[in-house]
Image (spheres, coloured by chain):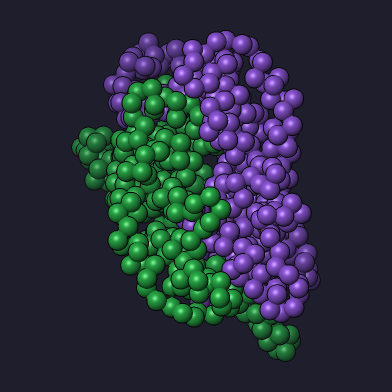
């Protein structure tokens, strides 16, 4: 804070009794009260409680004893946790790359002159409108070796001789889950990118066309810089969502076969299910550093706008 | 020139058709399989709709657990959505229109809560809910769902309030309206699309939620739809036709809401992330 603002705020507060006790401030706090109560009881308190739990030997029904960072030490020497962390990175990276490519490609397609653009946009929204728990059950079905559409297609067309257990085979499971997650998530990217493309001023394209720029140059030098802020925001919001995607894994593979698709939320859930509460809390909290980096980037971005 | 245009047109619509097949096939497969019995699935492997009948839907209608879960989901998500819209309007209004000390800090806290993955908090929430005797209750899950619906709703509505001309509230006040009158009669009608979009987005968010529901409402009477559908499978045996029929019943109304309110959903997502 510069000296000027400090002085002027002091000036105002002595004159008009501004600050916390002024009438308009009280009204503001009153309006914020419901949301802040929710956040205190169901966000701040659980978070604090979780940090505390992660430092105890809490299991079901025992009196939790403070054990310092032992859970974290145990965690980082637990091969399943290392696998889960590694899987999370692979899963999130490929899912995000896929959503970006598909989302941008389809946004560009929808941005062309089209008959019934509204209809095509509605079609693209379908996976996003479908509840996630339904979408992933359907994909589990599609991948099924006995009755799944993909195997029926592959064997009928002779591409493969025998059905493939896409979700039960270590070489296929991760790729299959990634593909299903991309299917469910790309519409958000496509719709956001489309809106951003439509917001780029048309004059820029006209001027570039006069200068003889070809389609690729126009895209590279006008469209891409124009939608860059949206790409960043969508990327950050979607990354948080993807780190979080418990259901995508739990409903399809439940983390299997033999941990090939275990990601951090699934690992934490399995820990809670076996009542390793302290260690599971530590595992869940290990997602924080990633989320914090993304939050800081996003806050800075929003402040700049 | 003309010829390349036609070629490009064909290419465009060919690509769009591929996208449409990619997007719509799972929905088609869900519906066709929901009409078939388990034995039909194993005896005739085809992608075409064969052996169609409504037995699985009849089973769903007769299944009291499923009906109970559907009712639970509607009560929980409906109530939580109503509360979310009310609370979010108040907070977004305060954060955008009013000036008070600590406003920016509170705004930042809401964004941080909005960005926190739900998987981070399910363990303490499950323990806390059990400790205060609210696990396996509709009220408990409503409260827990508010923890992610309220920051999301507030974040989206901040975008809508920001898009209003800033002089509007002042003008209404100069004309003699109180703060609440200005909010109720001038601002709210203008952010009405935002309210619809927040209602749809947060309702579907809650309706689709699996993890919290799975760890907090364990008893069969208090299950929500996602857990009920998950529980149709016994070990690795999935009754596919039945699961797909139940899934269709669960999904199609929500998808219909989405498409009827499509304009609002898209506007909400864009206001939240493009302008926000």
**In this orientation, does residue B165 appear?**
no
The residue at the far left in this view is B176
Q: Which chain corresponds to the colour green?
A: B
User: The chain coloured purple carries which letter?
Assistant: A
Residue A113 coordinates in the image, percent (x, y): 59, 76
A18 over A92 or under it: above or below:
above
Tell me: residue A122, above or below residue B200: below
Nearer to us in this view, B130 or B259:
B130
Where is residue B249 shown, x and y percent of the image? Answer: 38, 62
Residue A278 visible within the image: yes
Instruction: Please give left or right for residue B24 compared with residue A31 in the image.
Output: right
In the displayed image of the protein, which residue is found farthest to the bottom? B3
Q: Quadrant of residue A9?
A: top left
Q: Quadrant of the C terminus of chain A?
A: top right
**How many numbered discs sit on the rendered protein?**
0
Of residues A105 and B172, the one nearer the viewer is A105
**Residue at x 58% of width, y 35% of height:** A270
- Whether residue A147 sits left or right of residue A90 in the image: it is left
Residue under the point 66% across and 56% down: A167
Where is residue A213? Give x, y as percent: 78, 68
Q: Say which quarter of the image contains residue A204.
A: bottom right
Residue B118 drawn at (x, y percent): 51, 37
């Amino acid at each position: 804070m510069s000296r000027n603002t400090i002085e002027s705020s002091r000036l105002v507060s002595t004159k008009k009794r501004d600050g916390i006790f002024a009438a308009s401030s009280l009204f503001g706090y009153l309006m914020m009260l419901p949301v802040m109560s929710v956040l205190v009881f169901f966000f701040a308190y659980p978070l604090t409680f979780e940090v505390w739990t992660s430092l105890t030997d809490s299991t079901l029904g025992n009196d939790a004893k403070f054990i310092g960072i032992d859970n974290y030490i145990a965690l980082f020497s637990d091969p399943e946790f290392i696998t889960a962390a590694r899987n999370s990175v692979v899963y999130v990276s490929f899912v995000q790359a896929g959503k970006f490519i598909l989302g941008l490609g389809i946004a560009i397609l929808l941005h062309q002159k089209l008959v019934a653009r509204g209809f095509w946009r509605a079609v693209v929204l379908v996976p996003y409108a479908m509840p996630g728990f339904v979408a992933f059950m359907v994909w589990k079905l599609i991948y099924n070796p006995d009755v799944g559409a993909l195997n029926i297609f592959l064997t009928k067309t002779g591409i493969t001789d025998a059905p493939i257990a896409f979700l039960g085979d270590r070489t296929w499971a991760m790729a299959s889950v990634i593909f299903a997650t991309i299917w469910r998530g790309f519409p958000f990217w496509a719709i956001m990118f489309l809106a951003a493309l439509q917001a780029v001023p048309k004059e820029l394209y006209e001027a570039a066309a006069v200068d003889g720029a070809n389609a690729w140059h126009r895209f590279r030098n006008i469209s891409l810089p124009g939608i860059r802020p949206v790409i960043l925001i969508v990327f950050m919001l979607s990354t948080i969502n993807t780190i979080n995607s418990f259901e995508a894994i739990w409903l399809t593979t439940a983390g299997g076969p033999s941990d090939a698709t275990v990601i951090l939320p699934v690992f934490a859930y399995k820990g809670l299910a076996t009542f390793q509460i302290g260690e599971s809390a530590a595992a869940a909290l290990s997602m924080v550093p990633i989320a914090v980096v993304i939050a800081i980037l996003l806050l800075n971005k929003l402040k700049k706008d | 020139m003309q010829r390349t245009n036609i070629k490009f047109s064909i290419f465009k619509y060919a690509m769009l058709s591929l996208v449409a097949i990619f997007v719509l096939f799972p929905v088609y497969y869900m519906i066709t399989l929901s009409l078939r019995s388990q034995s039909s699935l194993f005896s005739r492997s085809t992608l075409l709709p064969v052996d169609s009948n409504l037995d699985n839907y009849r089973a769903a209608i007769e299944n009291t657990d499923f009906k109970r879960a559907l009712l639970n989901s509607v009560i929980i998500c409906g109530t939580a959505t109503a509360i979310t819209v009310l609370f979010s309007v108040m907070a977004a209004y305060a954060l955008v229109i009013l000036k008070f000390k600590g406003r920016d800090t509170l705004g930042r806290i809401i964004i941080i809560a909005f960005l926190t993955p739900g998987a981070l908090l399910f363990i303490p929430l499950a323990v806390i809910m059990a400790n205060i005797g609210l696990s396996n209750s509709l009220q408990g899950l409503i409260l827990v769902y508010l923890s992610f619906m309220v920051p999301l709703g507030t974040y989206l509505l901040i975008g809508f309030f920001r898009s209003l001309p800033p002089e509007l509230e002042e003008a209404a006040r100069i004309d003699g309206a109180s703060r609440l009158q200005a909010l109720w009669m001038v601002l709210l009608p203008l952010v009405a699309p935002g309210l619809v979009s927040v209602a749809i987005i947060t309702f579907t968010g809650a309706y689709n939620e699996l993890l919290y529901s799975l760890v907090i409402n364990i008893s069969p009477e208090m299950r929500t739809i996602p857990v009920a559908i998950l529980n149709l499978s016994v070990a690795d045996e999935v009754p596919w036709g039945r699961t797909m029929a139940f899934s269709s019943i669960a999904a199609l109304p929500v998808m219909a809401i989405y498409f009827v309110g499509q304009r609002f959903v898209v506007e909400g997502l864009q206001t939240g992330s493009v302008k926000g």
